[in-house]
Amino acid sequence: MGAILGRLAFLLAFAPFLQGVIGRTKAIAAGRTGPPLLQPYHDIWKLLRKGAVYSPVEGVLFRAGPTVGLACALVAGLLVPLFDSKAPMEFPGDVVLFAYLLGLGRFLTVLAALDTGSSFEGMGASRETAFSAVCESGLLLALAVLCLPGSVFSFAGAGAAVGGLIPHPAVLLAAAALFVVLLAENSRIPVDDPATHLELTMIHEVMVLDHGGPDFAYILLASAVKLFLMSAVLVRLLVPAPAAATEATSAIFLATVLAVGVLVGIVESTMARLRLSRVPQLLFSATALALIALAVLFHPTAGGWEAADALLAAVLVLNLFIASSSRLTACVQACGIQGAALSALPLALHGVGRAATSVHPLAMAAGTFALKAIAIPLLLLRAIREANVRREVEPSQSLTASLLLGAVFTAISFSLGRVLVLPEASSSALTVPAAFATMLVGFLMLAGRRKAVAQVVGFLLLDNGVFVFAQALAREMPLVVELGILLDVLVGVFVMGIAIYHISREFDHIDTDELSTLRD
């Protein structure tokens, strides 16, 4: 009982401080004085001293929502190990209960908003439930990465199991997915703005417009506790809890949690809020990242992970970014970054640290970097400037659908990777999955985009997939053949750039669908 009361007191006392850190970070980034570090405590104490006002149409759900929401957040806090590997309440399945408690608190908040009979709060409740339904998959999959390696479904046992995986690419991908979920679940930019007062753009804040006094204080406390808990889970995913807490480990944990708050403040200071139509795409990206993390985690490897695995995991993530981006410049830049990652792949697989190091990997790395990371992206960026087109306004299929199809193609590629047997020269089990996934996303870009530049990017993805697959046979393929293929790709992109320029000059656009209307 003492441990439970101590944990509850700690959550209520420390959780608002994390919000103060976020506020101070945003103020410093904006170059203004901003609120003091303890401003959340002042706001909560001021609300607790006020009285609550209720409308005649508001029933028991409206009054019970804030209290039950705070209770759910506090009970969820009893399940998460903070300073050591033990939690005040732990049992098999507590990870699932943690997610359900957060969902129950949100559900009661939505019911309280609907109980007011206000159209604005009903609008906010509709948005909250829609976005939260998408968030749940990303949260559960990220928690699965935490738990499944040790075949446990408890926070306490999961920490020890994940400890040997750091910094495994799967853990890093799951951490990225969990951070996106953290921003969405806590109504932070770029999903929502907790400081906005524009009712038509609110998501979470519009649901609590009618609350005041102690009820609103409970809502603020519940939000602070929820933010702290999700930050703590993110920290424990990256840094497992020690068996016994010491002053040093406790200080490191609190500093790391505060660092997450600083990161949230930096994101809010450097990013604009997304349009509501783009929010589901961001949330689906968290689910896709978590799915890739699970696939990478459980894909059979010869022993441990190496630098090549990290490079190929980055290639998979860039595939999803390219498939879901409407900005042509961003697609080309991401393709260039992918080319830079691929240029290091020959060294990671066959060069640095290998017994039989030769000039072959060095020549391939230099040639690939010069063409795929520098020359080809510069040619495409020049074509974009000449055509004066910045984004794919109306693709043949929605960007969200492209993202989901990219995730499905990635899962199919991992299934194929279990079937195909690679030669022993390839040290990474992710070579075949990354190759097939990149080629399938390239086909998706060719079939689903209308702008010529985007289709050229799809062609480059096809070539990148072939390049990754060829690394499994690098020792058998002559260097002259590989360099010749790279030069062919460069010439092809150069010719495509010239074609894009002439299409833009003749038709004032680069929409390839219009070419079907040409007649002799």
Image: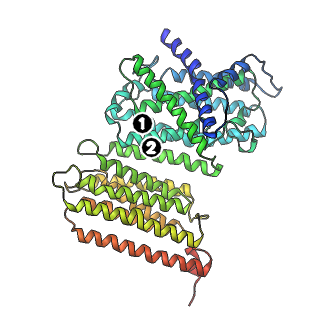
Judging from the image, the colouring scheme is rainbow
Q: In this view, does 421 lie above or below 494?
A: above
Pointer 1 or 2: first along the chain? 1
Q: Which amino acid does label 1 sit on?
A: Ala
Q: Mark 2 — residue?
A: 290
Q: Compute the Cα span from label 1 to label 2.
A: 9 Å
At 67% across and 30% down in the image, what residue appears?
A: 109
**Residue at the image position 58 percent from the left and 63 percent from the top:** 391
Farthest top residue in view: 2
Q: Position of residue 27 (x, y in %)?
A: 64, 35
Residue at the outermost right position: 56
Can residue 1 be seen at all in this image of the molecule? no
Residue 232 placed where, x, y %? 48, 28
* Image location of residue 58, percent across then percent down: 78, 27
| 255 on left or right of 185 | left
Vertical side of 236 occupied by 520: above or below = below
Q: What is the secondary structure assignment of the residue under circle 1?
A: helix
Instruction: Determine the residue positioned at 34% across, 54% down.
Output: 433
Q: Residues within 10 Å of mark 2 (few under 14, many from 20)?
A: many
Which residue is the site of mark 1? 144
Crowdedness of circle 1 by 10 Å Cα count: few (<14), some, many (20+)?
A: many
Q: Are marks 1 and 2 in contact (CB under 8 Å)?
A: yes
In depth, the one of 436 and 172 nearer the eye is 172
Front residue of this view, candidates 156 and 428: 428
x and y, in percent, of residue 509 in the image: 60, 74
Question: Is the residue 299 above or below the residue 15 in the image?
Answer: below
**Can the viewer see residue 499?**
yes
Name the amino acid, label 2. Ala
- 473 and 361: which is toward the camera: 361
Mark 2: secondary structure: helix
Quadrant of the drawing holding the C terminus: bottom right
